[in-house]
Amino acid sequence: MLPNHPNLAMRRAVEGDLDRIYEIWRARPGAGSNDRASDGRFHRDGFKEGVLLSSPFGFWVAQVGGRVVGWSSLTPTRFNPALRETMAEAGAYVDPAHRGSGLGFEILQFACHSAHGSPLEWILGYVAASNAAILAVSRRIGFELVGDIPAHVKGPRPQVLLLRYRVP
Ligand SMILES: CC(C)(COP(=O)(O)OP(=O)(O)OC[C@H]1O[C@@H](n2cnc3c(N)ncnc32)[C@H](O)[C@@H]1OP(=O)(O)O)[C@@H](O)C(=O)NCCC(=O)NCCS
């Protein structure tokens, strides 16, 4: 339960949440029908890895009234075993019907705060430059802009901004 959203409960994701995690991810803006995102099995397998191997960080689902309405995650970004625990990538996704009421902020903040006091040093965010909502939420939480990854290098991609959050 979170103080600003008494009806919101966060718990660790389990394999049984995969369909709902995938469904919410598919509902993001810009999800094309002609890219690999349309290959449900391919991506469900990808999330399975994220959910089941999210150690040492975490993968959580957000529930309102017992229904999963969003999820957030911290997933590894480094292969080097000496650095693996120091950096993670953040993800936050909210069911379209529940957006705009503060849930995105709560679930991303929950993920970031869960790392406080751990060996994790940085949380990175790769965010489409056009994604005003996640940019607003990230800034409020304390992410700062590091740089950008230009669009159209090897194909039509959105411009991506790289953000970082210093884990205390
Ligand atoms: C990004 C996302 C998680 C935010 O969740 P949410 O529950 O809608 O977020 P909140 O209600 O907590 O906050 C939304 C913020 O964006 C702002 N916002 C929303 N749309 C905006 C727009 N078009 N222009 C400017 N600001 C906008 C709101 O004003 C609010 O700002 P505030 O925190 O300063 O008040 C949700 O929109 C989502 O799931 N999007 C699709 C998935 C995605 O893009 N995830 C990010 C990739 S990791």
Image (cartoon, helix red, strand yellow):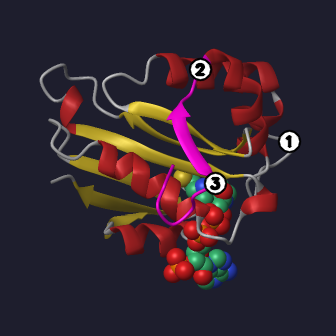
**Residue displayed at 60% across by 61% down:** 103
Task: Determine the residue located farthest toward the right in the rendered image.
Answer: 33
**Position of residue 45 measured from the top left corner of the image (x, y, whole percent):** 66, 17
How dense is the environment of label 3, judged by Cα within 10 Å: few (below 14), some, or many (20 and up)?
few
Asked if residue 158 can be seen in this view, the reply is: no
User: What residue is shown with label 1?
Assistant: 34
Q: Distance between the Cα atoms at labels 1 and 2? A: 29 Å
**Nearest the camera: 22 or 151?**
22
- Specify the amino acid type for callout 3: Asn
Q: Which residue is mark 3?
A: 7
Residue located beneath label 2 in the image: 14
Q: Residue at x 53, y 41 (%)?
A: 10
68 sits to left or right of 76: right
| Labels 2 and 3: the sequence-earlier one | 3
Which quadrant contains ligand 1? bottom right
Q: Secondary structure at mark 2?
A: loop
Q: Position of residue 162 (x, y in %)?
A: 38, 60
Q: Which residues are magenta?
A: 1-14
Q: Is residue 26 left or right of residue 163?
A: right
